Image: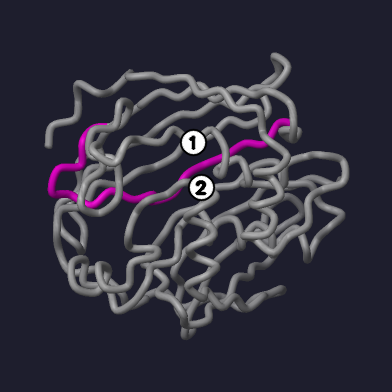
Amino acid sequence: MDFSSWIGRAETCDDNLDPGHAQRVALSLDEPLDPSGALPLLWHWAFFVRGEAYARLGRDGHPQQDAFLPPAGDFSRMWAGGRIRFHAPLVVGRPARRDSRIADIVEKTGRSGRLQFMTVEHRYTQDGALCIAEEQDIVYREPSPPVLQGVKPAPDAQWTQTVTPDPVRLFRYSAVTFNGHRIHYDDRYVREVEGYPGLVVHGPLIATLMTRAFTRAHPDLAVQSLSYRGLRPLIAPRAFQVGGRLQDGQTAQLWAEQDGTLAHQGEIEFSRA
């Protein structure tokens, strides 16, 4: 699993930010569209999607012969976290572009075995202006039993919301993001092959819900940047909580918790709207 030769590989993806698809994203997240046409935070993950033919998919539903990312082989591939800076909102119904580049690949060893961490840089532009700058961390994990128990206690929250990740919600999010990974919708596969006790909640969905909880609690604050990472999976259909607390006049902690321990965490930088 030597991916060093892939560093520097780049691709470009154009998208017209179709209003009909934006409406389907809104339904999947149970969130109304912004009347101004501005795409809400992190909804860009449902756009700029390149699909692959069935013949190029692996057993897990992920592309095995992706034209941009290295092949997973026997490893499991999933999002681990990332860092995003928001410069301006993308606007629905207008052409936009994503320029992507594999910036770095590092091998590590964790509780679940050998890992390959890949950093992918994305730049989203519209009308010639930079709207979003993103670094996305993707992890390739060798086959091993998943780590399900949390070890970090959740802090005291200043705001919190409860989420029930039922199978329909997970299926809809998979559909609007064109994510074929079977751990999110195929109960038999996820139990018998990957060893999870149930369907796995999408990491990007958790990050979206954490961020939404902040913006609902603080409609007068404008998010400037977000960093986030997953600590352990959340398993459907058990409810979990997304919440957070202000750290000072410019930053806030975010997290997703279940049974009092952290599953995902993040940090937001904000300013007064």
Q: Percent x, y for residue 65?
A: 23, 33
The label on residue 177 is 2
In this rendering, the answer to whether 115 lies above or below 112 is: above
> In the displayed structure, does residue 186 sit left or right of residue 174?
left
| Camera-side residue of 58 and 257 | 58
Q: Residue furthest top?
A: 128
- Extent of the magenta region: 70-88
The label on residue 49 is 1
| Camera-side residue of 93 and 255 | 93
| Camera-side residue of 62 and 21 | 21
Name the quarter where the C terminus is drawn: top right
- Is there a contact, CB below 8 Å, between mark 2 and mark 1? yes
Q: Residue type at mark 1?
A: Val
Residue 128 inside the magenta-drawn segment: no
> In the displayed structure, does residue 72 sit left or right of residue 230?
left
In this rendering, the answer to whether 96 lies above or below 241 is: above
In this rendering, the answer to whether 163 lies above or below 55 is: below
Q: Could you tell me which secondary element the residue under label 2 belongs to?
A: loop
Q: Percent x, y for residue 82?
A: 47, 44
Query: Mark 2 and mark 1: span between their CA atoms?
Result: 7 Å
